[in-house]
Image: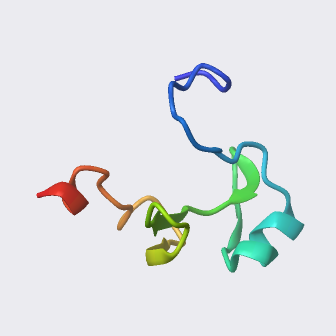
Amino acid sequence: MAAGKSMATFPIAHGCTKADAYTLGGWWGDHPPDGEHIQPTEFLLSRGGVVLGSMYASGPVGRMNPEKPYS
């Protein structure tokens, strides 16, 4: 889905900087030919904004499945 086309009712980060990665506790990666980018940094939040779970990855394996919390 293209940036800005999401139907989400909550903020989604796009175009994160190294400073953003540091603030979130995520890793900054440099993987040619893609270049530098923030590695997957995911949070499961309660309706009140409490972090119920988090996931940090250094690559494509281990990302959260959005359906898992409901199963």
**In the current view of this chain or complex, which residue is farthest to the front?**
48
Q: Name which quarter of the figure residue 27 lies in.
A: bottom right
**Residue occupying image coordinates x 46% and y 73%:** 55
For the residue pair 35 and 45, the one nearer the viewer reads as 45
Q: Where, by quadrant of the figure, is residue 18 drawn?
A: bottom right
Q: Is residue 55 left or right of residue 24?
A: left
Q: Is residue 34 left or right of residue 40?
A: right
Question: x, y (%) of residue 32?
Answer: 69, 51
Q: How is the image coloured?
A: rainbow
Q: Left or right: where does residue 12 sit relative to residue 28?
A: left
Residue visible at 78% across and 44% down in the picture:
15
Residue 61 lies, in percent from the top left, at 37, 64
Relative to 59, say whether 23 is above or below: below
Question: At 50% from the left edge and 76% from the top edge, which residue is drawn?
Answer: 51
The vertical placement of 46 against 67, above or below, is below
Q: Nearer the viewer, residue 38 or 41?
A: 41
Relative image position of residue 30 (x, y in whole percent): 73, 62
Residue 47, x across and y down, in percent: 46, 60
Mark count: 0
Quarter of the figure that contains the C terminus: bottom left
Establish if 8 lies above or below 14.
above
